Image: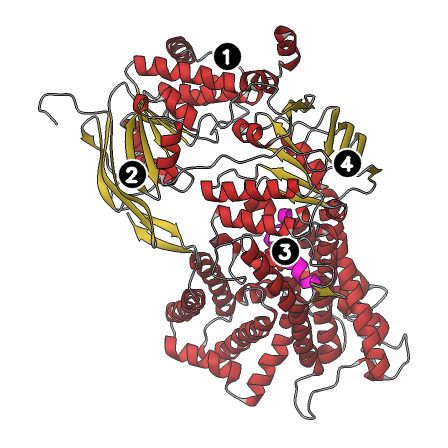
Amino acid sequence: MEGGAAPPALRLDRITKRFGPLVANDAISLTLDRGEVIALLGENGAGKTTLMSILFGHYVADSGTIAVFGQPLPPGHPAAALAAGIGMVHQHFMLADQLTVLENVVLGTRSLWAPWFDRAAARARIAQLSRDFGLAVDPDAPTGTLTVGERQRVEILKALYRDARILILDEPTAVLTPQETEALFATLRRAVGQGLSVIFISHKLHEVLAVASRIVVLRHGRLVGEVAARDTDRHLLAEMMVGHEVPAPKVAAQQAGPALLRLDAVETPDRNNRPGLRGVTLDLAGGQIAGIAGVSGNGQGALADLISGIETPAAGALQIAGAGVSRWSPRAAIRAGIGRIPEDRHKTGGIDAATLTENAILENYEWPPISRRGWMRWPVAEARTRQIIETYDVRCPGPATPLRLLSGGNIQKLILGRVLEAAPRIILANQPVRGLDIGALTYVHERLLAARAAGAAILLISEDLDEIMALSDVIHVISRGRLSPGFPRGSKTPAELGLWMAGHGHDGARDAA
Amino acid sequence: MAMTGPAMRLERIIAPSWSRRLGLPALALVATVAIAAWLAWLAGAAPLTVLGLIVDGAAGSKFALLETLNRATPLIFTGLAVAVAFRARLWNIGAEAQLYAGAVVTVLLGTGAIVLPAPLLLPLIVGAAMLAGAALLLGPALLKTRLGVDEVVTTLLLNFIFLLFVSYLLEGPMKDPMGMGWPKSERLVDAARLPRIAEGLRLHWGFGLALICAAIVWVIQARTTLGYEIRAVGLNARAARFAGVPVNAVILKTAFLSGGLAALAGFSEVAGLKGALTLDLSPGFGYTGIVVAMLALLHPLAVVVSAIFVAGIFVGADSMSRAADVPTYIADLLLAVALLLMVLAIKMTGFRLVRG
């Protein structure tokens, strides 16, 4: 660096972090200039989160140094990172729902021993920040009543209120509609205009290209590329991220089969702050994929629980292959031929501490050949598991391995095997590729498409609009527990779907007409 | 507030090695002995002498050893009861009450109400006692599965309620008219007594029954669908429910098994050792069963070893305190320390302490 120039906002120098044999960060160096947005791009497991955790003091690097505005940052002290002006907006918001926006923003900035607190000054400061950065939000609203987009603004306000000069956003768009994402990008541009520096972590290529001036790509813990946004495109970035070219899923057109799943004006109750279903009607035929798009927390959970057998309809009817269901339960759903891939593979899909065998037989242990008259036949169970491991390419030391030792992708393959080996005629796939690397993601999609070709009816729930649009024969949008009509493949643009996701579907339809 | 100095932190170990999984609990036991020695020194005695006296008192002679095994018998039952329940994350703290339920039924049926030869009478009493213990845990289990009531609270409080009920029985309907006014039940008839394992030895068949129960529980856990269900529910009830395991039914079955096993402790103490029911039948066997089960890492066969170890400490400490003038409370302290260190050792199996 030439003498005299101001030091960069942030300089990471040869950061290395190992976890046992795994090198999570391998001598990563990068520089963030003042007033610049850089994107940190990489698959899950590429080392993005580890790097940011080191920067924020949650982990200590094995070697390497960090300098903030030219000053070395002591490792392992989140308080020091905060004091140096680093602000982090986590993917999962860290807000207290019961408190107001103002209370959440000032939380933790005051000394425990301060006798009083100047609410008026805090309010004025928040109002100023809101104006400067285009972060419209009512300071007196209880945080629990805010939309997801508004909550994210509160998180950003929190960081700015603490005088952050460097903002780190971890997968900030995962929970936003396309319109909200645009608003976030506008805020970031204003922040940069005010001299802030931003690190934007994502694996969504078009967003990275839209918001960042420079893109840093990580793969397997190594920095594999650094490019200016104007010099690259989606294909090049995808190749850099994965190490080879990424094939788009090929969805062959095919005739719809007989109707297999029908929901008729189904209502379910709200549960723990999560909306239930409001008059949901849906028809799904064999050989078809129905994609359910929507912003997270809009009734996807209730819909998945209903199909899984965990929730029963409070009103309306659920029909499987033309027959109504009675005594609905997970076991009844399995018996009716529904294969269920749950949203949370660690907490709902599998038992972390149990072996692969124990996990593989969780849905069919009670019947021959896995057990007979109450006696387990472990050799049979193990043989079944070996077969799943082989057929579904589960990378593992063997069937006696505890599930938690597997990567997310391999856990998902095991669950996929457990589900598909039962030859289901209806498949519920709830966020089937969230958090998976491209290899596992492609594999899961191929398997689902193969099941579709074999005549299964597939309900695909995802918050990733790209995934929905790539795979679905019919797209529905779920918003506040209501389901839109089905739109045939290719009949709606992302922006039009975004209006439905924001709950303005009917207005939008009118505007378009 | 910034911290100063090199910070120590815990790092998760993904796959703990076997040496770590067995070594740390062993280390916990060694540390327990060291702390015991230190306590003895505080009490003004020579540590090695005290330890020697405890070991000698617990296993130094045939008499001592048999006394230890006799004391271990109820602990095996209550330890199994707790281990079975805890595996399913059913926190049964009520083994004490279930023990007394078994004892009450033993006295009800065994004091002449039914006249049968021993080979018929004993199995009948065993079955009835188990049912009584199971019924006592079924209430809290139903409250848990139906209404989400915390079973720790209900089972714990039931202990006191049931002990007061036993006190009422012994002062009233079950009081021995020939008992000189003491709150004590009538004695069992001979056909209802558990015979000794060998003539002249003070060890009764309750110990044999305990070993058989441990084996049966082990077979249930390792080989049956119920055992698999219990494990699945205990490790992740949400995933089990999602996969179609009837979680509530499994919890109720577990409660049935656990309550029944705890009741056998009461049966075995009355029919094998005391011959009658008094209010001091159990010096907290139900609670000590929790220690036994935790030390055994909830494994049914290890419960036998752990129960003998715990019983040995009690018996040895009794005999030591007579000889060395160190209070017998050292046994309670020892167990408390052993339990705390063991829990720490189990927790630390999955973590390592690193600097920085």
Residue depicted at x 43% and y 39%: A44
Q: Which residue is mark 2?
A: A223
Counting from the top left corner in percent of width and height, residue A159 is at 37, 23
**Location of residue B203 by image quarter:** bottom right
What separation in Å lies between label 2 and label 4 (alpha carbons)? 50 Å
Residue depicted at x 54% and y 58%: A390
Q: Which dot marks residue A258?
A: 4
Q: Amino acid at mark 1?
A: Asp
Coloring applied to the structure: secondary structure
Near mark 3 (Cα within 10 A), the count class, few <14, some 14-19 or many ≥20, is many
Q: Please give the range of residues in magenta.
A: B225-239
Q: Which residue is mark 3?
A: B232
Q: Which dot marks residue A26?
A: none
Q: In the rendered view, would you say B344 is above or below A140?
A: below
What separation in Å lies between label 4 and label 3 (alpha carbons)? 37 Å
Q: Is residue A118 visible?
A: no
The mark nearer the N terminus, 2 or 4, is: 2
Residues flagged by tags 1 and 4 on a common chain: yes
Write down the chain letter for disc 2. Answer: A
Write down the chain letter for disc 4. Answer: A
